[in-house]
Amino acid sequence: MIRLRVGKNCYRLGWLFVAAVAMALWLPSAAVAHTGGSVLGGFVSGFAHPIRGPDHFLAMLAVGIWGAQIGGRSVWMLPVVFPLIMAIGGFLGVMDLEVTHVELAVGLSVLVLGLAILAAWQAPEWLAIIVVGAFAVYHGYAHGSELPKAADPVAYGLGFVTATGLIHVAGIGFGLVLGRMAGGWISRAAGGAIALAGVYFLAG
Amino acid sequence: MTVAHRRWRGLATVLALAGLAIASSIDGAFAHGFVEDRSYYENGLLHAITSPVLIVAMSAIGFALGKVGREWDWLSAAIFVGALLASLAVPESIGLQVFTMAAPLLLAVAGIILLLFGPLLKWSLPPLAALMGLVAGVTLYLDGPADDDWPWFVVGAAVSSGIVSVVAAIAWRWLERPWMIIAARIVGAWLVAVGVMLAGLVWNDVTAL
């Protein structure tokens, strides 16, 4: 059983995340064009990809916040299950197999996860895993289909892992620290904002 | 813990991340470049710390050694070194097949090692260390020079790999905090995912030939 001390540790994670986001936004736009041949180019490109893609970013942030909101094992279980199931979709994407309605499912994931946070839905662990896992397949497909375009797929993948890990951890940190203030309404408000973004993605 | 201690620890973390980024910028997934005016031993030393996949794999082994109890450290470490040496006897035809899948395999196994904790890690670390040692050894052997001096290259790479692992093991024990367990699990899960996706990519390339 992991007992997180809500305090300095979580605030440090928050600062780490702010630094990561600042780094990604500061990087030149050419780095995202997947043309860099060096490992650093591939790493930067992979790192920036999930941060600069608002739909993936919000979905992964939402997974972290929702897990923290549910509490217990879900704090780490949801962010761990997400990539493991996502790998299936990623494999399909890399193999260039046909999966339809990917963008719709990604937009829907942002909406549903945002609503779950807004409603402070204390879903049973198995159900939360099913919800997260179902959407993870589509996120994986989107990421997997991007991978072959990377100049250095290994470095791209490592950059991607670093960024997504930070986003999940930031979501957990947000949920555990800020989210519990004001009777949990800060988390719920963030969930509402994420759900609105989901509506925007679906409408667009 | 004193304020000065905390500051030094923060600085060490930032330096480690910067070092990783700089080292990663030097060469390919497995560093293929040779520095002409340096010996094979020195090139071997550089090889392991300029190869992102090997850094991740060795760090994961180190973190795992830090995570498990002290009485298990020597066993997994010895198995890893033994497998690394045994891999040098692998026939080249088999080695080349392993080499094509080396990056996905090393990343996925590194991810599993980070994902596991407790008794599950204790029991699975020795076989996983053996697998990593074999695969890492094959990449070192096939990436090294083709002449008679290749053992020096392997020795150099083994030394720097060992340093990376030991630093990671010490860092885990020194820095260990509850949130690090969560972070390790998340990063481990993502490494497994990237390993699976890269395996698909390699499979695509192989079947397209």
Image (cartoon, coloured by chain):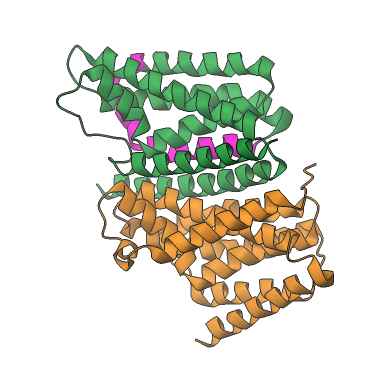
Chain colours: A orange, B green
Query: Where residue B35 appears, x then y in whole percent?
Result: 19, 29
Query: Where residue A82 appears, x then y in whole percent?
Result: 61, 56
**Which image quadrant for residue A182?**
bottom right
Residue B105 inside the magenta-drawn segment = yes
Q: Is residue A176 left or right of residue B193?
A: right
Q: Is B188 rendered above or below residue A6? A: above
Q: Is A68 rendered above or below residue B103? A: below
Q: Residue furthest bottom?
A: A203
| Number of marks present in the image shown | 0
Residue at image coords 59%, 80%: A197
Query: Where residue B196 appears, x then y in whole percent?
Result: 48, 47
- Pick the front one: A180 or B105: A180
| Main secondary-structure element of the magenta-colored stretch | helix
Residue at image coords 29%, 35%: B31
Looking at the rendering, the stretch of residues picked out in magenta corresponds to: B88-116
Q: Is residue B85 left or right of residue B147?
A: right
